[in-house]
RNA sequence: GGGCUGUUAGCUCAGUUGGUUCAGAGCAUCACGUCGACAACGUGGGGGUCGCUGGUUCGAGCCCGGCACAGCCCACCA
């Protein structure tokens, strides 16, 4: 069969993915093997995978494939998240384009659109996961709004409510005026910026024309002022006890109050108190029993209570109010001010602190076991300690979690209200009615009574925060909540490793631990691997708005999935941000081709096999033995690195093994001459090594490796599930001999290069050595690699040759060409100087009494050996120099 | 304001308990090369005072203190 010039990923990828699926390699059922469970961080159902996902999924696939090939029953559960706010926003925008206003739709009608939308676009991410080669168990695909999942969320809500861990109440929360819903604290992102501080003077209600000045960033909220607060120790305002002032523009009369909270040194030392629109003011208001005047509507416009600029947007109103205040002489000063503002994570608008009745989870009690699990080391966070402190701090200072959202897309809160506003929490209206009747003393109501009662109940309109469903993910994907203790949940839970972005450590990771500890009394996963943020070349975060996030499918089309996986992994040290550069994808593509070309070379030999399996020729023995040992050494290294989640380094190690050791050295060493035959034993070993290399690389680059595995020879199995064999310990002596051989070859090549010897020019090589026997096994390789037509051994210098030294041995290169020995001499002199410097540093150490007294014996012995070796080497170099001149 | 992390070659990063001259890898760069796998390549080379500064030690890229710069997280000072 004719092999193409370069590796062509497209057809290969599709072919193998289909094959793996048809063989059921990715689908997992509990059995006698240990489970290796990974649950995918479910991406937004209507989103697309960005580079951050690509990194995440690749890492997971590498771990899962490696486990699958190492005796584990690997189970990787895919799925998606309904992402309530994000998705609802998209659906609202979509129907708006059709000319439909969400407000004109019933809840049911809206949800119909939402599900249609989900069915239409929900497949995109699954397709991307597939194209990337992810070995997920598609039979287990879970969506956070699946029926069982929905039930699980409701069940947990009711349970926590009954345990007193969920409550409903009016609190100051973060309000998103664009989405018109409450947000949790975690959904607010703060940005530093330069704002303006306005100094306003309020007229005092005293006999004289007197004013008190305050400073504010938000003049549009003055209509909600219900007090002015000063520090009781501030002498400037001591005379104002019991005094009142008038709010500018609307002339509301408000009291001057006194509280230590106010910093006399800041601004004017007087603070306007607006309990409805600032968390601090709210707390002050509670303490001093102040009136709350809410001047902003849920959509961010001024309310009727504001009295002026009613219906205008808060920011437009601000401008106008500033102008009016200025015209009327209330604005006394304007200054620049460094501040930070909260933005909604989803809609990007400035968040409005707002008092509102919402549902909350009490976090303190849930946080304690979750904290312990990590502090005790039951859950290990990678990399290292970097995120441990963050995790700890958050849990130690955790605040209650606002879980209600004023949306329709999500799990509707199972609370039911009667006409009087009395509330019952239950899964269905009937159950709610039953509870309500029980409360009224009717313990055994008739069906019709229940029915009648239930019809009068109205369910809470709000849905739950998306993360209130996501935190059950590791359990409910195996129905661990809806069918507690079922066989699958027992087998697969807790998961092995969670791979996710560090940005959702609070949103998701910490809460999953809480839920796991609460409902399984067990951690949800043993290891957490945090990937870094993917940035562009300039170090900017990849985002849609910047348009700097490449399209994954486009990248796969252009470079191939393996190359994309390679590119993102090779530049991705654990936990560090990675600068995404297509350059590294190119490197991946080149790597594919390199392997492909090695395959072509080996296939060329297939027809030229000579002899039978048992027959051996001494010529290439060393290459075979050396590579086998080299392979064993790297396998051990890679295993160690992967256990520590140092995946990038493991990949680099494999890369170098294949490119350098296998292609550049080994294949050259065993390569037969032009149109010469190759020993069958050498050929067969080479194929085996190649297979093992492909196996080692397979978790990282599944497609190209599987393809080559099958092209190498007829196979009975697939690489995808081929189990790793036990690794043998490498022979250190063989390895060092290999290193020596490489060094000799490089040194001689360098000398050839410097003397302008063309590759075609043959040389005669004379070796002066005390260990002639060590060359017997590598002589033929050496002569081939340096293009020597003859190698002989000598006991003295050979005149008119190029001389180089490696360790204690000297090599005389004789060529037909006229030689220029000056550069060679320079090199030797440089080396000599270098060796002498080294010698003096070693001698200095050895003559230092304290070193001799304190250093460990092996260190001392090493230094002595160094000294002896260096002396010998200096002698060799000096002799070489004298033979030149 | 509190906390965390980083600073090593032009770029992106390794550097395991301090001990070979330990200063590394990949990419980029330069020279030479189209020889029957591979120019998406081969062979070879050049390139860094390990942010600065004190200290501990026989010995520091690595340990400790201080400083500078960068990034991230957290925090109710208008």
Image (cartoon, coloured by chain):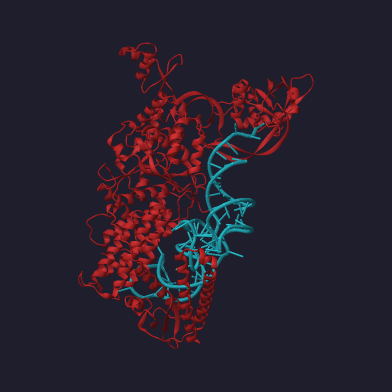
Chain colours: A red, B cyan
Q: Is residue A171 above or below residue A793?
A: above
Toward which corner of the image does residue A296 lie, by quadrant? Answer: top right
Q: Is residue A497 above or below residue A870?
A: above
- Residue B33 % position (x, y): 42, 76
Residue A30 showing in the rendered view: yes
Q: Nearer the viewer, residue A457 or B78?
A: B78
Residue A557 showing in the rendered view: no
Q: List the single residue furthest toward the top.
A: A441
Q: Is residue A23 above or below residue A413?
A: below
- Residue A587 % position (x, y): 42, 60
- Residue A684 % position (x, y): 25, 66
Q: Nearer the viewer, residue A826 or A101?
A: A826
Q: Nearer the viewer, residue A68 or A301?
A: A68
Q: How many marks?
A: 0
* Quadrant for the N terminus of chain A in the image: bottom left
Toward which corner of the image does residue A560 lie, by quadrant? Answer: bottom left
Q: Nearer the viewer, residue A696 or A702?
A: A696
Q: List the single residue furthest toward the bottom.
A: A799
Toward which corner of the image does residue A629 lie, by quadrant? Answer: bottom left
A848 relative to A693 in the view: left or right: right
Q: List the single residue furthest toward the right.
A: A208
A505 relative to A354 in the view: left or right: left
- Residue A155 % position (x, y): 37, 27
């Amino acid at each position: 069969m004719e092999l193409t010039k370069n590796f062509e990923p497209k057809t290969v990828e599709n072919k193998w993915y289909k094959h793996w699926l048809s063989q059921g390699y990715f689908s997992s059922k509990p059995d006698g093997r240990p489970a290796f469970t990974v649950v995918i961080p479910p991406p937004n159902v209507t989103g697309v995978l960005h580079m951050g996902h690509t990194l995440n999924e690749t890492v997971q696939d590498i771990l899962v494939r490696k486990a699958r090939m190492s005796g584990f029953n690997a189970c990787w559960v895919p799925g998606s998240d309904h992402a309530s706010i994000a998705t609802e926003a998209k659906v609202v925008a979509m129907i708006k384009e059709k000319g439909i206003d969400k407000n004109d739709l019933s809840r049911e009608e809206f949800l119909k659109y939402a599900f249609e939308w989900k069915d239409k676009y929900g497949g995109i991410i699954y397709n991307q996961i597939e194209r990337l080669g992810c070995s997920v168990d598609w039979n287990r695909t879970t969506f956070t709004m699946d029926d069982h999942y929905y039930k699980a969320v409701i069940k947990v809500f009711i349970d926590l409510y009954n345990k007193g861990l969920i409550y409903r109440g009016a609190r100051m929360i973060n309000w998103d005026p664009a989405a018109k819903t409450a947000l949790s604290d975690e959904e607010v992102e703060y940005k530093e910026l330069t704002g303006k501080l306005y100094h306003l003077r309020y007229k005092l209600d005293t006999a004289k024309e007197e004013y008190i000045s305050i400073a504010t960033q938000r003049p549009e909220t003055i209509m909600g002022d219900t007090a002015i607060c000063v520090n009781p120790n501030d002498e400037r305002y001591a005379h104002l006890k019991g005094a009142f002032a008038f709010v500018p523009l609307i002339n509301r009369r408000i009291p001057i109050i006194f509280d230590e909270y106010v910093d006399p040194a800041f601004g004017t030392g007087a603070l306007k108190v607006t309990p409805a629109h600032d968390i601090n003011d709210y707390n002050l208001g509670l303490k001093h029993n102040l009136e709350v005047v809410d001047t902003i509507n849920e959509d961010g416009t001024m309310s009727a209570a504001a009295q002026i600029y009613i219906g205008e947007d808060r920011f437009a109103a601000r401008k106008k109010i500033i102008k009016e205040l200025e015209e009327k002489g209330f604005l006394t000063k304007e200054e620049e001010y460094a501040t930070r503002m909260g933005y909604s994570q989803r809609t990007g608008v400035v968040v409005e602190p707002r008092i509102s009745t919402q549902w909350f989870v009490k976090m303190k009690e849930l946080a304690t076991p979750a904290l312990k699990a990590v502090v005790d080391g039951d859950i290990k966070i990678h990399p290292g300690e970097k995120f441990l402190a963050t995790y700890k701090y958050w849990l130690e200072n955790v605040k209650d979690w606002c879980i209600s959202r004023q949306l329709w897309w999500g799990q509707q809160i199972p609370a039911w209200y009667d006409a009087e506003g009395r509330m019952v929490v239950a899964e269905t209206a009937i159950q709610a009615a039953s509870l309500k009747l029980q409360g009224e003393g009717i313990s055994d109501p008739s069906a019709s009574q229940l029915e009648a009662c239930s019809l009068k109940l109205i369910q809470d309109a709000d849905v739950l925060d998306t993360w209130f469903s996501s935190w059950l993910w590791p359990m409910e994907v195996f129905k661990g909540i809806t069918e507690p203790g079922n066989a699958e949940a027992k087998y697969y839970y807790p998961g092995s490793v969670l791979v996710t972005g560090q940005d959702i450590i609070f949103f998701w990771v910490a809460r999953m631990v809480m839920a796991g500890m609460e409902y399984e009394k067990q951690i949800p996963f043993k290891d957490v691997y945090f990937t870094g943020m993917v940035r562009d070349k300039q170090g900017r975060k990849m985002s849609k708005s910047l348009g700097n996030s490449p399209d994954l499918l486009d990248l796969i089309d252009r470079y191939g999935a393996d190359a994309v996986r390679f590119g993102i992994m090779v530049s991705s040290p654990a936990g560090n941000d990675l600068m995404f550069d297509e350059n590294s994808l190119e490197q991946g593509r080149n790597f594919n081709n390199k392997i492909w070309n090695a395959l072509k070379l080996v296939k060329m030999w297939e027809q030229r096999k000579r002899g039978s399996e048992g027959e051996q020729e001494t010529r290439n023995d060393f290459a075979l033995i050396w590579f086998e040992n080299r392979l064993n050494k790297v396998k051990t290294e890679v295993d160690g690195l992967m256990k520590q989640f140092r995946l990038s380094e493991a990949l680099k190690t494999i890369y170098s093994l294949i490119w350098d050791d296998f292609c550049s050295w080994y294949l050259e060493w065993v390569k037969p001459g032009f149109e010469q035959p190759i020993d069958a034993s050498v050929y067969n070993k080479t194929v085996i090594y190649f297979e093992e290399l492909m196996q080692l690389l397979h978790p990282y680059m599944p497609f190209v490796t599987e393809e080559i595995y099958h092209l190498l020879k007829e196979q009975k199995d697939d690489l995808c599930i081929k189990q790793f064999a036990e690794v043998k310990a490498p022979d250190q002596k063989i390895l060092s001999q290999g290193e020596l051989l490489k060094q000799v070859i490089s040194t001689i090549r360098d000398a050839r290069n410097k003397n302008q010897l063309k590759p075609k020019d043959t040389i005669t090589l004379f070796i002066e050595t005390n260990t002639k026997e060590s060359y017997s096994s590598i002589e033929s390789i050496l002569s081939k690699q340096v293009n020597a037509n003859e190698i002989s051994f000598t006991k003295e210098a050979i005149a008119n040759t190029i001389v180089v030294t490696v360790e204690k041995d000297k090599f005389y290169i004789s060529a037909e060409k006229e030689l220029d020995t000056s550069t060679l001499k320079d090199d030797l002199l440089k080396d000599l100087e270098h060796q002498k410097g080294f010698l003096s540093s070693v001698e200095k150490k050895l003559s230092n009494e304290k070193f001799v007294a304190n250093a460990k014996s092996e260190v001392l012995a090493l230094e002595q050996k160094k000294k002896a070796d260096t002396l010998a080497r200096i002698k060799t170099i000096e002799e070489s120099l004298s033979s030149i001149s």
